[in-house]
Image (cartoon, rainbow, N blue to C red):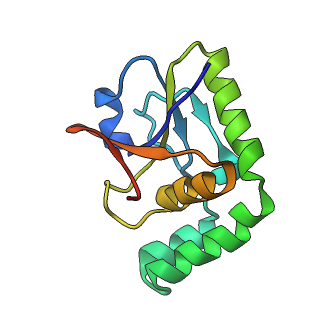
């Protein structure tokens, strides 16, 4: 079964379709967030998060470091296959990768989407309450 992958953020969870598999890729997930799965391999490190939030390094540097320290150790094809498999096992139609940042704000979720697109030849969409839109075009 073909699975479409979206990105979104925790505040949009109530607006996500019921048949969408919800995956947190955040170091911390809100207790109120009704998610289906945590995906710790895509979480930023606590150090990266602290640096990004404190402003001690630029957002661009933080995202570059995330790509180098986290994503470079993973296979985008394997991560994509794992995401599809867990979505299918849950009998869900599509999947949303979730974290805290609002759509349009710099965020590691966008880096994950770009990395998946580059490495597995898929398109990752951004889910917004206004509708589903391409993230990176």
The number of numbered discs placed on residues in the rendered structure image is 0
Q: Quadrant of residue 69?
A: bottom right
Q: Is residue 25 visible?
A: yes
State the quadrant of the N terminus: top right
Asked if residue 127 lies left or right of residue 7, the reply is left
State the quadrant of the C terminus: bottom left
Q: What residue is drawn where x is 51% and y is 32%?
A: 4
Q: What residue is drawn where x is 59% and y is 72%?
A: 48
Which residue is nearer to you in this view: 64 or 26? 64
Q: What residue is drawn where x is 44% and y is 63%?
A: 107
**Residue 38: where, in percent of width, then height?**
61, 38
Please, is residue 117 above or below residue 63 in the view? above
Asked if residue 103 lies left or right of residue 51, the reply is left
**Residue 86: where, in percent of width, then height?**
67, 25
**Residue 132: where, in percent of width, then height?**
31, 38
Please, is residue 27 above or below residue 71 in the view? above
Asked if residue 115 lies left or right of residue 60, the reply is right
Q: Residue furthest left?
A: 130
Asked if residue 43 lies left or right of residue 57, the reply is right
Q: Quadrant of residue 63?
A: bottom right
Q: What residue is drawn where x is 61% and y is 52%?
A: 116
Please, is residue 47 above or below residue 127 in the view? below
**Residue 36: where, in percent of width, then height?**
55, 26
Q: Quadrant of residue 15?
A: top left
Q: Is residue 43 visible?
A: no
């Amino acid at each position: 079964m073909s699975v479409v992958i979206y990105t979104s953020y925790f505040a949009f969870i109530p607006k996500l379709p019921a048949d969408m598999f919800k995956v947190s890729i955040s170091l911390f997930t809100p207790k109120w967030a009704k998610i289906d799965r945590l995906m710790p391999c895509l979480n930023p490190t606590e150090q990266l998060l602290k640096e990004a939030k404190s402003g001690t390094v630029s957002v661009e540097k933080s995202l570059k470091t995330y790509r180098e320290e986290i994503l470079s150790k993973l296979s985008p094809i394997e991560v994509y296959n794992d995401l599809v498999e867990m979505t299918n096992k849950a009998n869900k139609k599509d999947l949303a990768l979730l974290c805290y940042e609002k759509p349009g704000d710099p965020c590691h979720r966008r880096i994950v989407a770009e990395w998946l697109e580059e490495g597995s030849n898929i398109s990752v969409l951004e889910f917004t309450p206004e509708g589903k839109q391409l993230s990176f075009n």
